[in-house]
Image (cartoon, rainbow, N blue to C red):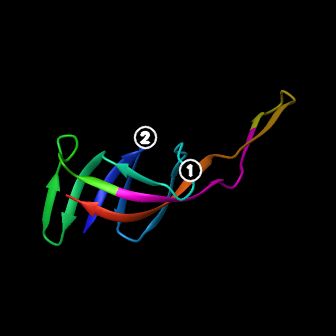
Amino acid sequence: MYAVIKTGGKQYRVVAGEKIKVEQIPADVGSEITIDQVLMVGEGESVKIGTPVVSGAAVKATVISHGRHEKIKIFKMRRRKHYQKHQGHRQNYTELRIEAISA
């Protein structure tokens, strides 16, 4: 069984037992969270699509860790104008382990 969930403005296809990195969620490490924004649930040939969410569906996940992604380097330059700008960015994330999907 798999599900498509929405969290942090992005959509993820998840399966039970899988680890994913999502936008930072304010929860303690080791705590269990419930994601109720389930857009689709599928098992084999049967698929349930929500309008926009599947009613009664939820995904249980455990917070494994918090961290920061690799640095993204941003470089801007205007040719012949003697303008250069260097910038970097590291996005915060929360790593989740998907425990169960209930439809």
| Image quadrant assignment for residue 89 | top right
Question: Which quadrant would the N terminus be assigned to in this image?
Answer: bottom left
Nearest the viewer among 22 and 28 is 28
Pointer 1: what residue?
28
- Circle 1 SS class: loop
* Residue displayed at 65% across by 54% down: 69
| Image x and y of residue 25, in percent | 52, 45
Crowdedness near tag 1: few (<14), some (14–19) or many (≥20) residues, C-alpha within 10 Å: few
Residue 82 part of the magenta segment: no
Residue under circle 2?
9
Q: Nearer the viewer, mark 2 or mark 1?
A: 1
The front one of 30 and 77 is: 30
- The residue lying furthest to the left in this view is 46
Residue at the (20%, 63%) spot, across then down? 42
Position of the C terminus by quadrant: bottom left
Question: Residue reaching furthest top?
Answer: 81
Report the side of 44 relative to 89 (left or right): left
Asked if disc 2 and disc 1 are in contact, CB closer than 8 Å, the reply is no
Q: Percent x, y for residue 22? A: 50, 52
Vertical placement of 45 versus 63: above or below?
below
Image coords of residue 88 (percent x, y) = 75, 43
The residues colored magenta run: 60-75
Tag 1: residue type?
A: Asp
- Inter-mark Cα distance, 2 to 1: 21 Å
- Mark 2 residue type: Gly
Point out residue 31 in the picture as x, y percentages from the top left corner: 49, 55
Q: Which mark is residue 45?
A: none
Q: Is residue 59 left or right of residue 62?
A: left
